Structure formats: structure tokens, C-alpha cells
Image (cartoon, rainbow, N blue to C red):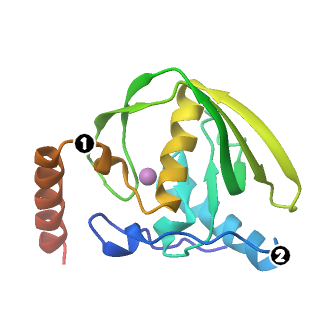
Amino acid sequence: MAILKILQYPDPRLQKIAQPVKQVTDSTRKLIRDMAETMYAAPGVGLAATQVDVHQQIIIADISEKHNQLLVLINPKLLAQSGDEESEEGCLSVPGIYEKVQRAEKITVSALNERGVEFTLEADGFLAVCIQHEIDHLYGKVFVDHLSQLKQGRIRAKLIKRQRENM
Ligand code: NI
């Protein structure tokens, strides 16, 4: 296993649109293991392949306290959504920034698991927020994109400054 490098906002590669996975293979599973190790090490509760510069439709999440309930969604599709929820979000690609974002409260999503088997999942609360946030990444969207232009500009400037200081 390996810890992968997580792209940092506003890296333009975070805006790439991910392609569907045609076949779930051993290399897909290796990528997922590496993504999981990277997410747990960060530590974070969700990660999209986009964030490690692999532009395939793969997301993982684990909101459990013991970090032992890894959820893998390959080619996720939002089938239904309902309700409104506003909660504070953060992102491993936007370190140290937390802002309130509006999302659906309840979702139904279908996807393939790491064995290539299709399943459907209903989620609400924090898990629903997490899955919507990760699916956004596959479409080149970061949670910051949901904020006002003013806030986006401030966050961009702050992170660029910080990245320069760390060079
Ligand atoms: Ni994120």
C-alpha cells in the first residue's frame, strides 16, 4: 500500500471530469487500497480518486469512529435526493477551511463495489453529505465552488499564500 499525494485547491487538476470505470480489476482494487490508506492517514472521512489525480469515478468514505466501515462507490449515480440540509464541510484538498454548504438531506445512490457488483444505498445525515461532496469531486467540483465568489476568492488567496510559504 502507499500513501498518495492529495492535490491542493486551487490546483486545476481538481476540475477534471472523471471517467466511468469500464471494468473493476485488481489495479482498481489496488488504487482503492491506496486511497483508503491515504484517507485514513490524513485523517479524513472521504476521498475521491480525482483528489489523488486519478480521473476515474471512484470515491471512498468511512464515517465510523473506529475507521473500519469503508464504503467504496465506483461509478456512483445519484438516483434520488430529497430535503435540504446545511452543514459545515471540510476537504483534504482544502486544508484548514470549513464552511457551511447546502445539500440534499437524503439521497439514494447506486454504484459498483470493489468486486464490481452493483448495489443501491440510501443515506442521510453526515453520510449523505459526505457522498454528495465526494461525487462533486468526480465532476470537477470542490465544496468551495458552492460558496459566494467573495468567499471563493478569499479561500483561494489564503491557500495560494500558504502553499508558497510551504515551498
Ligand atoms: Ni473533498
* Residue 30: image tag: none
Residue 128 versus residue 42 in the image, above or below: above
- Residue 14 quadrant: bottom left
- Could you tell whether 146 is left or right of 62 in the image? left
C-alpha distance separating marks 1 and 2 = 37 Å
x and y, in percent, of residue 120 in the image: 80, 40
The one of 83 and 61 positioned closer to us in this rendering: 83
- Residue 20 quadrant: bottom right
State the quadrant of the N terminus.
bottom right
x and y, in percent, of residue 139 in the image: 49, 60
* Residue 25: image tag: 2
State the quadrant of the C terminus.
bottom left
* Residue 147: image tag: 1
Task: Please tell me how crowded label 1 is: few (under 14), some (14-19), or many (20+) other residues with Cα within 10 Å.
Answer: some
x and y, in percent, of residue 68 in the image: 72, 42
Q: Residue at x 29, y 49 (%)?
A: 144
Q: Nearer the viewer, mark 1 or mark 2?
A: 1
The one of 64 and 155 positioned closer to us in this rendering: 155
Residue 131 versus residue 75 in the image, above or below: above
Q: Residue at x 13, y 73 (%)?
A: 164
- Could you tell whether 64 is left or right of 46 in the image? right
**Looking at the picture, which amino acid does disc 1 mark?**
Leu
Q: Residue at x 55, y 74 (%)?
A: 55
**Looking at the picture, which amino acid does disc 2 mark?**
Thr
The one of 71 and 167 positioned closer to us in this rendering: 71
Q: Residue at x 53, y 29 (%)?
A: 126
Task: Please tell me how crowded label 2 is: few (under 14), some (14-19), or many (20+) other residues with Cα within 10 Å.
Answer: few
Secondary element at image label 2: loop
- Residue 85 quadrant: top left
Secondary element at image label 1: loop
Of mark 1 and mark 2, the one earlier in the sequence is: 2
- Count of picture labels: 2
